[in-house]
Amino acid sequence: MTGDLRAAEYLLIDDAPQPVDVSRVSYQYGSLSDGGHCSDLVDCECGSAIEEGCCAAVYDCGPTCGCEGSGCGCCGDHDGWLSRFLVPGDQCFTDFISPMTNPVFFEDPRTLTEARFIYLHHQVPNGALGGNVNVIALQLRAALTENLSIIATKDGFLTSTNPLIDDGWADVSAGLKYNLYKDPSRQRLLSAGFTFEMPVGSTRSLQGNGDGMFDLFLTGGTQFGRNNHWVSASGFLLPTDKSAESSIWFWSNHVDHRIAGTNFYLLGETNWYHYMSSGKAFNTAPIEGGDLFNFGTVGVAGNDIVTGALGVKYKPHSKMELGFAWETPLTERRDVLQNRLTVDCIFRY
């Protein structure tokens, strides 16, 4: 009798449906909308892997788990103590990775709750007196609702061997981001937002100048092909004191490919900076500061600089990313960038 009970218990455990790792669905089936069936992975009958009924059954949750009722693993267990203080980030686009370069202004379109640690090793061209600038920073994002999040995108401490830039603190930027559109079945989304850069940094580090600067931006992303993603963001950097800082229009793009069957991504990025108006504060050389500095240089209106980057990211699960990217200018104009190594590590809730 005891043997029969043990055999029955074994059969029940062995026949239990196995949970699906939603972060792997897109590369197993090509895309979330091209006919991958949950019934191939678990004991449930349904259509595509993002259909409400199937995903609700897989995750043992109700018919609406965020993501406009698509389920899709968006209702994970968040009953811990953190749920008293934080709203979980969007989990309907967990196969995406965040952009790496232009880290202050190239914003991820998703609504996220995360801490992102950043290290930059920035080499200055000899034409700008050479040397290196190293930056250690922490970005914070917190979802306030399903679509609204607060973002803190610039802070940190920098050290420098360039004779014009001394060690010191960076300015601090914070603002809001709102998701305007999302379609989990097609893996597309669009968000808009703004930040305000407060001039509280060290003037000896070429921070703390002017009366602050607004960043007004749009950012969106989509999955395409089997394991690929495109994220694009564009915005205007508008100083409140146009004599102290220059006005800039930027456009940044990110493309990645997830290596099938692994947690590794290959990525490429480009960043375009167009100077719409010049400042009046700096006339030593006709150069500007890109994404880290704004000198308010005389005579830079109309200048353009384009940078390109290649990198790799490791994403062991949907709550963590570790990335490396190497960036260099693609235009003859370099301003203060010879090349840059960016390393980031992200922890999400």
Image (cartoon, rainbow, N blue to C red):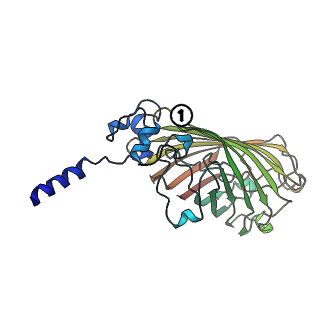
Residue at mark 1 = 186
For the image shown, how many numbered marks are present on the structure? Answer: 1
- Residue plotted at (87% across, 54% down): 240
Whether residue 251 is visible? no
SS assignment at label 1:
loop
Front-most of residues 283 and 261: 261
- Of the 4 image quadrants, the one containing the N terminus is bottom left
Residue situated in front as seen by the camera: 117 or 62: 62
Q: Residues within 10 Å of mark 1 (few under 14, many from 20)?
A: some
Asked which quadrant contains residue 348, the reply is bottom right
Percent position (x, y) of residue 119?
59, 61
Q: Is residue 246 left or right of residue 311?
A: right
User: Toward the viewer: 280 or 130?
Assistant: 280
Label 1 sits on what residue type? Answer: Arg
Say whether residue 198 is left or right of residue 307.
right
Q: Position of residue 19 (x, y in %)?
A: 36, 48
The answer to whether 336 appears left or right of 11 in the picture is right
> Residue at image x 82%, y 40%?
302
Q: Which x, y percent locates residue 215?
A: 76, 50
Taking the view exactly as shown, the residue that stands out farthest to the top is 34
Residue 242, position in %: x, y? 89, 51
Residue in view at x 37 percent, y 43 percent = 261
Is residue 68 in view from this perspective? yes
**Considering only vertical position in the picture, is 213 above or below 269?**
below
